[in-house]
């Protein structure tokens, strides 16, 4: 009788939706704090935008002293910062709610920690200045889609409170 080798189980993301892509980390396979790129959860409200980084521009405008538009090439000339960051979708564990609530039905895997490298927003704001009375910053993406509660086409955006420089 021939001995059968047990096959190694490969971890894959758990698909919640394909369009837009929403995939959950299979937490039972995690053995370290940092999650590999292949197992990092993916949360999208709309499909991925089509754009080339060589034609990417980042405008900073609004409650700043001087509006400015940065090219990707210009952004990459600034010194980057590397941070270990934990990201969690606000809907993590939504599948466990009773009664059920609207939204992607995540179990426990809409959370991942990784190492991120990039240019801090603070660095870019040094060129524009942020008014001391600014209460929030709105980041708007290139991804667009239809809102589920209306027929309106919108850019994906998120707001967060501004912090005064120390």
Image (cartoon, grey):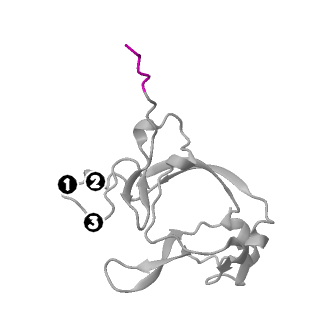
Q: Are marks 3 and 2 in contact (CB under 8 Å)?
A: no
Identity of the residue drawn at 69% across and 71% down = 53
Mark carried by residue 102 = 3
Quadrant containing the N terminus is: top left
Q: Is residue 49 magenta?
A: no
Q: How many marks?
A: 3
**Could you say which quadrant of the image residue 152 lies in?**
bottom left
Residue 70 location, x and y as percent?
73, 77
Q: Magenta stretch? A: 1-6
Q: Residue furthest right?
A: 77
* Frontmost residue, 164 versus 93: 93
Query: What SS does tag 2 mark?
Result: helix
Between marks 2 and 1, how big is the CA–CA gap? 8 Å
Identity of the residue drawn at 66% across and 73% down = 52
| Label 2 Cα neighbours within 10 Å, binned few <14 / some 14-19 / many ≥20 | some
Q: Residue furthest left?
A: 99
| Label 3 Cα neighbours within 10 Å, binned few <14 / some 14-19 / many ≥20 | few
Between marks 3 and 2, how big is the CA–CA gap? 10 Å
| Label 1 Cα neighbours within 10 Å, binned few <14 / some 14-19 / many ≥20 | few
Residue 56 horizontal side relative to residue 43, left or right: right
Quadrant containing the C terminus is: bottom right
Question: Mark 1 — residue?
Answer: 98
Earlier-in-chain disc, 3 versus 2: 2
Question: Mark 2 — residue?
Answer: 95
Residue 159 location, x and y as percent?
50, 72
160 shown above or below 64: above
């Amino acid at each position: 009788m021939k001995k059968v080798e047990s096959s190694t189980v490969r971890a894959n993301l758990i698909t919640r939706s394909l369009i837009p892509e929403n995939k959950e980390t299979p937490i039972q396979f995690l053995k370290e704090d940092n999650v590999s790129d292949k197992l990092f959860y993916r949360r999208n409200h709309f499909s991925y935008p089509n754009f080339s980084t060589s034609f990417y521009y980042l405008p900073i405008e609004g409650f700043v002293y001087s509006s400015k538009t940065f090219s990707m090439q210009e952004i990459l000339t600034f010194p980057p910062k590397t941070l270990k960051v934990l990201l969690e979708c606000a809907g993590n564990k939504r599948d466990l709610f009773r009664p059920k609530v609207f939204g992607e039905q995540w179990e426990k895997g809409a959370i991942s920690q990784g190492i991120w490298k990039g240019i801090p927003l603070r660095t870019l704001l040094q060129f524009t200045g942020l008014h001391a009375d600014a209460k929030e910053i709105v980041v708007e993406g290139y991804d667009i889609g239809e809102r589920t509660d209306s027929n309106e086409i919108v850019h994906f955006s998120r707001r967060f409170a501004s912090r005064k420089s120390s």
